[in-house]
Amino acid sequence: MDGEELTEQETALYDRQIRVWGADAQRRLSKSHILVYGMKGTVAEFCKNIVLAGVGSLTLVDDRAVTEDALSSNFLIPPNENMYDGKTLAEVCCNSLKEFNSMVRVSVEKGDLSRFGGDFFDKFDIVIVSCCTLTTKKLINEKCRKLSKRVAFYAVDCRDSCGEMFVDLQKYIYTKKKLDENNQPTAIERELQYPSFQESISVPWRKLPRKVSKLYFAMRVIERYEEVEGRNPGQISIDDLPAVLKLKKELCEAQSMNESHIPNALMEKLVMGRREFPPVCAIIGGILGQEVIKAISGKGDPLQNFFFFDAMDGKGIIENISPPNT
Amino acid sequence: MDSLCHSSAVKGAKVLMVGAGGIGCELLKTLALSGFQDIHIIDMDTIEVSNLNRQFLFRQSHVGQSKAKVARDAVLRFRPHISITPYHANVKDSDFNVDFFKQFSVVLNGLDNLDARRHVNRLCLAAEVPLVESGTTGFLGQVTVHVKGKTECYECQPKPAPKTYPVCTITSTPSKFVHCIVWAKDLLFSKLFGDKNQENDLNVRSSDASNSSEHGEDVFEWRNNEDIEQYGRRIYDHVFGYNIEIALKNQETWKNRNRPKPIYSRDVLPEHLNHQNGNVDKKCATDDPLSVSAMTSLGLKNPQDIWSLTENSTVFLESLKLFFACREKEIGNLSFDKDDQLAVEFVTAAANIRAASFGIPMHSLFEAKGIAGNIVHAVATTNAVVAGLIVIEAIKVLEKDIDNYRMTYCLEHPSKKMLLMPVEPFEPNKSCCVCSESPLALEINTHRSKLRDFVEKIVKAKLGMNSPLIMHGSTLLYEVGDDLEDDMIANYTANLEKVLSELPSSVTGGTMLTVEDLQQEFTCNIYIKHREEFDEEKEPDGMVLSGWTQASLEKKDDNKVVGNGGNTSTSMPTEGEREVELDEISEGTEISGKKRKQPEVSAGETNSSNEVQRLDVVDDDEDELVMLDHQDTSNKKKKLQ
Ligand SMILES: [Zn+2]
């Protein structure tokens, strides 16, 4: 144990969850520092979960103004415009989040995330990005990986009925509970090696198992399209569909994959679904919260390394998309 | 189903939510964000501090207020133009009748107990309103859809009975900490502070009960002019010393068991406890009697610490003393409540001293409280995920997209790569007496059993009826209601005390009784079979109901059983109902897999890894219960061989 005990106030407030993950995990949570970027519905859900869980601090980065779109699935934004007059998205959300748990420091960092240096990211244990370009995703992921300490990186995106989460815990060692041959509980040490986002998406498609979620490929097409067209994430409409389908065909050909493997209907849904669907935000934000709690507490098997959910079939699927040697 | 995210049915829907707790807060938020405009919400609870870690619509300043009302106000802050109607009331109140339910397009449950769930299930069936049911524990959760005639109802599948323990395990041969807790809570605490008229097995030992007569009935009474500490020590020596000595005399019991060690207060405590004597009055001076605490007065701070035997003994005497000094008025009426600090302290100390005597590891107050109070393991994330899944199902129900209805399990460990696993709903169970009309059979001694036994043990406990009406042909034998005439009430009260065969319209073998709950609009027919004898051990009720799908998970080798949690209505330690999910997920194929397609959670895994899953799921707070399960399983296997 770390020596420092939970206060009476903490024990009373966190009673029910300490019964799930233990006092030791609760202490680690209270010393962890989280950074999030991209304050839309999914991240709002995650922030709520992690503030309730009782992390040490949560830092929000998002200089964008509050728009109609941002309002649609984000319960942290009051509908009264006077309340966010002149404030950034991060500032408005920060005010709401502070109320959830006075024991967590919630603050805003202004500026362009992709320009922040290593010493900035070094202050955190967990970095989460959402609604950012492919370039930014890769850049932030690399910055985290260059640090001497392990900073876990997560990227989440939800469109229409679909959601995706990527996890990079780099080298992660934890104890896993098992029953031995006499059915006695024992703990074994386990080491996991995670690839970076760049490494993952570079794995040739034909080398992936056949049953990999179609959503994985579809999201790569959209991501690439927005990148080459110089769009902001989600800045895409039905007018783009023919060009998106053309890109899909090209990518499939280049990857020697039958293009029917990525249904056009799915592409159309993602192109149209610039707004998040609140139930999916709750689900992805919930799973993300759970994974972050696992990574901080060292309790439980963390997922490797993508998670997909589609409300249409209701499946929440884990896919391990790693280069063969990791 | 293309319109899932843009469903036009959402705006016009009128939704009833039952429960504004862990799942309820998340659900209300997600419904509001998803465009629902007319939401009604029922919850009888008020807000507590331990809710605040996950019920995010509530703040410290709301403690004590109605959950339904505060949740409404909180959601209106970010969605001011929708209509939310709160009811700070019990869903079982007669106002919420079938007509009330009929006004809704769909009912969404976020409940924490079996009784209310059964009640809502019946109202939904009667009102023909679809029901989306949910539950979570820790990282586990599930969402199911119940549409009359299309899918199974909530009660089509047996629900595991609450965990119970053989009486002799509790009174004589505890082997797990939970046995000590049940002893301390249901026997010792009840004996000292509860209703004196209630049956109590504290002094009953399996074979030589007669022996104890010289120590007699009065042992637990506080004698006139007796010093309170003296009284406490007398109780201490009796239950932890004398009773153990008596038990040890029964050589047979200890042949294959470790012999317990009697503990007397003089062995662990100084002759006189001279801490802050005379301060008792000051300790009681607080406004709130529920804030009186032995830990506070003894300077014990951390509820996670495991106290020594001496500390436990000190807490035992101190808490007993405080009960008599500060809460004397309540004595005789108390029942254990996990939020009653002093009661938790007393039970923890007593359970630990007993554990020490039997060589069982002692536990912290935090852990003891969890076991004694059947406290739900709850985190915000699972509730959020489950709420998302409920809304998705609700929209499908509104769209009448029957082919795509799913029940979904949230797992802690992936199965077939899935953490969220959808399964096609099952068809209604044709022999379910709730949603089909199949009659039940009851074996009973019609010359010995009274109508009261039938009402308590069958109609209320087994059939879960709230306000029953019992008919034999056209003769009313019994009825509950607000608008009854005095002479009717007198008549029914008299009937309760009559044996079945002597009722105004004699009930004998071959009689068909009709039992009805008017509020639930639930009727069932029970065919009576007379039977002379019942096995006291195996059939403690003295009657056997069949054709009714009540699970009996554990085979007992003793007749009487002691539950950990009292009556059935509060027995499930859940924000949903964990027991059910766990069993369905990890060993469903064994228990009820005959005709159900089980979710193939354990596909490709061996039995032992099922156990791993179960262990991980329960985590380290409930090792005792896990080991118990485990042992039970292996015992069963042995018997089979
Ligand atoms: Zn049924």
Image (tube, grey):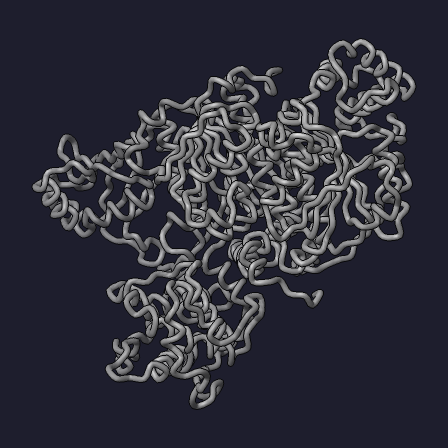
Question: Which image quarter holds the C terminus of chain B?
Answer: bottom right
Q: Nearer the viewer, residue B136 or A9?
A: A9
Q: Position of residue B394 (x, y in %)?
A: 51, 25
Residue at 83 percent across and 11 percent down: it is A243
Residue at the image point whose x is 90% and y is 46% from the top: A146
Question: A17 or B29: nearer the eye?
Answer: B29
Note whether B144 is above or below B360 in the view shown. above
| Image point (44%, 87%), residue name | B274
Left or right of residue B216, residue B435 in this image: right
Going by the picture, which residue comes out furthest to the bottom? B271
Front-most of residues B69 and B120:
B69
**Snapshot quadrant of residue B216:** bottom left
Q: Is residue B538 above or below residue B37?
A: below
Quadrant of the picture in which ligand 1 is shown: top left
- Residue at image x 42%, y 89%? B272
Taking depth in this image into account, of A229 and B241 the one nearest to the observer is: A229
Q: Based on the displayed image, in which of its 4 quarters is residue B491 positioned?
A: top left
- Position of A21 with respect to B281 (left or right) is right
Res. A199 image quadrant:
top right
Q: Is residue B546 left or right of residue B606?
A: left
The correct choice, above or below, for B93 with respect to A232 in the image is below
